């Protein structure tokens, strides 16, 4: 009886250790996608979101949202486009991209900010119950200089 | 007898004309570039900027095809290419500036050669017409009509190409620089409301969010 109690107490003592290990591993394993981010960017993972920065003010992120109600890429792309156009965003280009298992639709927008013009890219792709979203923005000329890198990053994203 | 002679003449004339070499006057070796420019520019006054561009184009010998409040379609003399770029740069912030060039010099030479050989053939037909009998005249006339139509078609194509070499095709879309920060509207889909340039770009920084 006493021995059983000791074993039980020992198990309780090791619980926090397991919890800490699980907690530490959680952010690493919970991104539902794989992506190759070039070394020129400083990347940071926050839960299911990956944010990366260039040294000169370009910023991009990859995240996912629930595909609820469950619709396809074309539907959500149209919904997003309608919304942003309705808010006055100026569309500069609309492009499709294909990665290993994702079909993307991307929009690039032009917006004013602090006496300058910025480009903002929104790309999305639906797979099952998830909507994968990539956003990227930067002052127009800076954005243009990273446009090819952004395209390479989109086409490298693989849904797990 | 006379009819068959004419037939052989026509056949041989067509055959040999196909092999007439391009002469030195055919502009052989000269680069024939058709240039088209597409630009998007943010300016303070799109209408005024469009009018300025039209004025410049017309003053330098060009002409405009179409104008709306926010865009212009023009034909500007090819030698003004650099000046157009300077003018567009000065007028506002260039968002996009694409130049496309197509070298259609070979096509032009082929057409010019075809025209020359057909014109030569036409003269030969005319000479033959004077000495032909009634039956032959009818068939010659048919050939002449066909040849004239071909010559007109070739001349039209060449004129169109020459116009493309002489004038740059210019399309400019203007955006107003005065438009302010877009109004934030609500979407019925929650995640779409989280897509916003200003909150995305301004949110935190590295290891700060």
Image (cartoon, grey):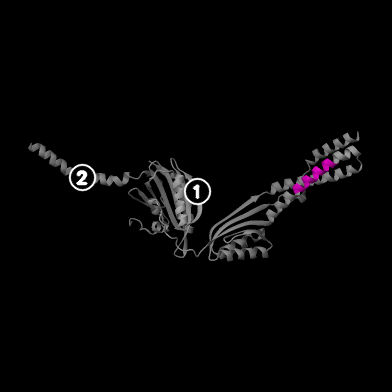
| Residue B147, placed above or below residue A120 | above
Q: Quadrant of residue B60?
A: bottom right
Res. B38 visible in picture: yes
- Residue A70 magenta: no
Q: Which label sits on residue A95?
A: 1
Question: x%, y% of residue B189?
Answer: 39, 50
Q: Quadrant of residue B168?
A: bottom right
Res. A151 visible in picture: no
Question: x%, y% of residue B150?
Answer: 77, 45
Label 1: few (<14), some (14–19) or many (≥20) C-alpha neighbours in 10 Å: few
Q: Chain of mark 1?
A: A
Which is more toward the observer, A23 or B16? A23
Question: x%, y% of residue A55?
Answer: 41, 57
- Residue B153 magenta: yes
Q: Which residue is mark 2?
A: A17
Q: Which residues are magenta?
A: B141-154
Are the residues tagged 2 and 1 within 8 Å (C-beta)? no
């Amino acid at each position: 009886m006493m021995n059983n109690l000791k074993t039980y107490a020992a198990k309780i003592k090791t619980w926090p250790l397991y919890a800490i290990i699980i907690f530490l591993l959680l952010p690493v394993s919970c991104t539902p996608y794989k992506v190759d981010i070039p070394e020129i960017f400083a990347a940071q993972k926050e839960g299911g979101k990956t944010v990366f920065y260039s040294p000169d003010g370009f910023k991009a992120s990859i995240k996912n949202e629930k595909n609820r109600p469950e619709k396809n890429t074309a539907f959500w792309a149209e919904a997003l486009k309608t919304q942003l156009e309705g808010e006055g965003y100026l569309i500069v280009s609309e492009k499709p991209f294909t990665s290993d298992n994702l079909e993307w639709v991307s929009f690039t927008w032009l917006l004013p900010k602090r006496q300058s013009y910025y480009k903002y890219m929104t790309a999305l792709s639906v797979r099952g119950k998830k909507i994968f979203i990539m956003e990227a923005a930067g002052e127009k000329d800076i954005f243009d200089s990273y446009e090819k890198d952004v395209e390479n990053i989109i086409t490298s994203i693989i849904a797990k | 007898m006379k009819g068959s002679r004419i037939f052989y003449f026509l056949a041989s004339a067509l055959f040999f004309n196909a092999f007439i070499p391009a002469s030195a006057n055919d502009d052989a070796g000269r680069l024939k570039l058709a240039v088209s420019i597409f630009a998007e520019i943010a300016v303070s006054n799109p209408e005024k900027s469009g009018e300025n561009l039209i004025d410049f184009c017309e003053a330098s010998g060009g002409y405009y095809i179409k104008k709306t409040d926010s865009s212009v379609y023009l034909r500007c003399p090819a030698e003004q290419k650099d000046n157009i770029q300077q003018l567009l740069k000065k007028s506002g912030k260039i968002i996009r500036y694409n130049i496309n060039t197509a070298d259609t010099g070979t096509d032009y030479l082929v057409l010019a050669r075809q025209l020359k050989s057909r014109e030569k053939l036409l003269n030969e037909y005319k000479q033959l017409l004077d000495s032909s009998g009634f039956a032959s005249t009818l068939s010659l006339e048919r050939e002449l009509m066909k040849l004239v139509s071909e010559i007109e078609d070739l001349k039209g194509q060449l004129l169109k190409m020459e116009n493309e070499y002489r004038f740059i095709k210019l399309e400019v879309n203007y955006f107003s620089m005065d438009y302010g920060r877009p109004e934030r509207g609500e979407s019925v889909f929650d995640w779409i409301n989280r897509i916003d340039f200003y909150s995305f770009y301004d949110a935190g920084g590295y290891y700060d969010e």
